[in-house]
Amino acid sequence: MFKNPISFNISERKILLRLIDICIVLGVLYGLSSCFEFDYFKMSNENWSWIIVLILYITIFGTVFEIYDLQKSSVFQSTLPNVVLTTVFVVAFYLMTPYFTPFLPEKRIQILFFFIGILGGILFWRAIYITFISTPRFYKHVLLVGEPEYIDEIVTSLKGVDPNYNIVGFINCEPDNSMKPTLTPSYVSADLNRVIAEHKVSEILVATYNSELITSELYQELMSLLERGFPIKEYTQAFEEMTYRIPVHYLGKDFYKYFPFNRNNQNKLYLLQRWIFDTAFALSGCVVGLVLLPLVFIGNLIGSRGPLFYKQVRVGLHGKPFSIIKFRSMVVDAEKNGAVWASKNDARVTAFGKFLRRTRIDEIPQCLNVLKGDMSLIGPRPERPKFVKELAEVIPFYEARHMVKPGITGWAQVKVRYGETVADSLMKLQYDLFYIKRRSFFLDLNILVKTVTAVVFFRGQ
């Protein structure tokens, strides 16, 4: 039986980070209560609810402040401010919920011990993780099988998601092709077993756009490895699992294999739950909008003279057009020369409009669109008919995003900040189709948490 070298998948490392965060924080707090005069947080059978609440807060705020982002967790300078923010909010909320947590201690110094215990525990584990787990010793060494013209793009995509995913090379299925990838070495079919042994390869990704290019000899070698228990995956499957998006630009005529859309798209119970949540959210949003309306009116009067609201035609469910409504954030004649892409530092956005966008206040009137049934809270962002027509001509499956209602926020919105080019639209489409394919209560909840993160870090456009 083939023996795999030790490596961790993305999901395994995220679980590892979360579990040991909890274990080490509880261990540190238990040590403080046992060895010092620290009685604010004592673990016992009677106080089990305190532990549950603390675990819940660490999980929620750790997700909000992205301390489980693998890219950031691999660099101490990147993860340090996020861990500090997480600890501040965990301790603050823990202190503000004394019905479920201990009452405030008489000696306020114990709050400092509580804070240092949580912060020190998480940072200690991060230092261990960066020093040992994120080292090349635990990298996942992967060998690609495919055509040379796609290899650099594949290597870039996978490395950008997982810093520990090491592409050692690729078996060239087109040895007569003169194109030479620059990001990874090229090998021929006869080198397969030698490369696996020399580089301690733990997985093979088959990334051939044309499966007929795999020769009978290479096919037999792959079958032999598979029978010995060696992991072999199809590239689009691995890409989707790692990046949480669908590589539509890589799919051919057999695209239907990759779109077994989630039954939740027709599940009456799930759709009812979404309708109830959308309605409750929209009503709450309208109340918030009415409260903020005087502030927006005054700001608009001072820094952005002109209409308070603006309407614009967007493409909705099944390609049906509707009018979206927002607080105006651009100058009145922003599109006097025709529709253009919005950009990160768009000169057409007024000073007050920048504030509205960064705080997402400009999105609040869309709650009216949700109540009308044109939109949902979560879904692909609705685009303008002109851009839809242009993008559908150059991006395959672009109009498939109209299979569900558009949303105020969505999977693409929390993963990609701006969409200024066709390449950006392709990236967002990949996330949108992943959402349509996999949408569920837990994915919706994940999107809501990440939306809160975007608002907290002022990542709005």
Image (cartoon, rainbow, N blue to C red):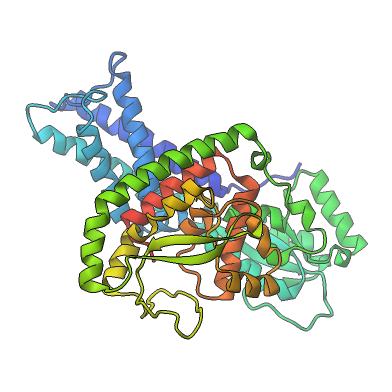
Hey, which residue is sitting farthest bottom in the picture? 337
* Image position, residue 211 (x, y; %): 85, 62
> Which corner quadrant of the image does residue 171 belong to?
bottom right
Compared with residue 373, is residue 163 higher up or lower down, i.e. above or below? below
- In this view, 440 is above or below 147: above
For the point 28% across and 13% down, the residue is 46
Left-right relation of 5 to 74: right
**Quadrant of the image occupied by residue 303:** bottom left
Query: Where in the figure is residue 448, as x and y percent of width and height?
Result: 44, 46
**Side of 127 relative to 377 (left or right):** left
Q: In this figure, what is the number of numbered marks?
A: 0
**Above or below: residue 101 compared with residue 405:** above
- Location of residue 236 in the rendering, given as x and y in whole percent from the top left corner: 70, 57
Residue toward you, 309 or 99: 309
Name the spot of residue 378 as percent of width and height, x first.
51, 49
User: In the rendered image, is residue 140 in sight?
Assistant: no
- Answer with left or right where residue 335 lies relative to residue 101: right
